[in-house]
Amino acid sequence: MSTQPIIGITKPERGDNLAYTAMGLAVRLAGGVPIELSPGMAWRKLRLKGLLIGGGSDVFPVHYGQDAIEGARYDHDRDEMEMYWARKARDSHLPTLAICRGAQLMNVASGGSLHQRLSEVYDDVDYPSTPLGHLLYRKTITITDDSLLSRLVGKPATRVNSIHKQAIADLGEGLKVSACERNGVIQAIEDRAKPFYLGVQFHPEFLIYRKEFRAIFEGLVEAAKAY
């Protein structure tokens, strides 16, 4: 019998294949077996040892008591699937890593809210919006002491990519901030009452050439083995 745990990776029914492939590779390198979790399949029936909620379109604002904004892209079927799995994982202690949109959804699933337009709340949020900018731009985040993220990364600060337009506002129940930028934008959240329930605003799947980011996926897979 294989000791490699099955990790469900969420994605839309169509598209986002590059990010999904990168997450799958990161999970495989860490010793897990990635499987797709998308709205077009019988997603409630899967038996998982770990969960990875991926990035993508915006979470529909009605889920956190706000109105939709012009120009946003929503995926209601994906919202339904990921809300179900985020809450199931939280309640069953299923090891979970949530990335970018996934971290935002993790927060909303626990009753939190989001900033839909960062420029209306924070200074110095002129993040890149081009593919080259997404590839090359880096910003520094400060990591909270004694957090899961701190134990995984092994340093008090690091530099990450920036591929987001929105961010976490009010925290959901049970969640704590585990990393921020200098301007105050939340870059990681976690529930310390769970063995592994971590959301990061950045994209570690595109940074796995660095040991500290491979360690995030290794931590997920190790927690999944013990689940």
Image (cartoon, rainbow, N blue to C red):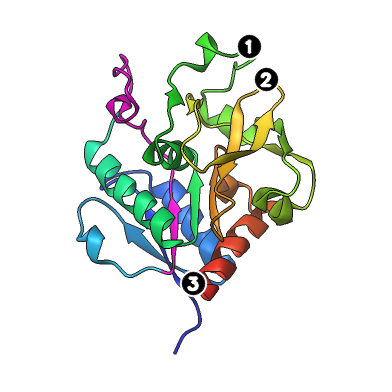
What residue lies at 44% left-to-right and 26% top-to-bottom?
114
Which circle's residue, 1 or 3, is located before the other in the chain?
1
Front residue (pair 119, 62): 62
- Marks 2 and 3, the one that precedes in the sequence: 2
Q: Which quarter of the image is occupied by the N terminus?
A: bottom left
Location of residue 191 with respect to 160 vertically, above or below: below
Residue found farthest to the right: 155
Q: Can residue 160 be seen in this view?
A: yes
Q: Which mark is residue 123?
A: 1
Give the residue type at disc 3. Tyr
x and y percentages locating residue 138 in the rendered image: 68, 32
Residue type, label 2: Asn
Question: Taken as a whole, is the magenta stretch helix, strand or loop?
Answer: loop
Q: Residues within 10 Å of mark 2 (few under 14, many from 20)?
A: few
Secondary structure of the residue carrying numbered label 2 = loop
Mark 2 — residue? 183
Q: What is the number of the mark on residue 227?
A: 3
- Helix, strand or loop for disc 3: loop
Marks 1 & 2, CB-CB < 8 Å contact? yes
- Residue projecting furthest to the bottom: 1
Q: How crowded is mark 3: few (under 14 residues within 10 Å), some or many (20 or more)?
A: some
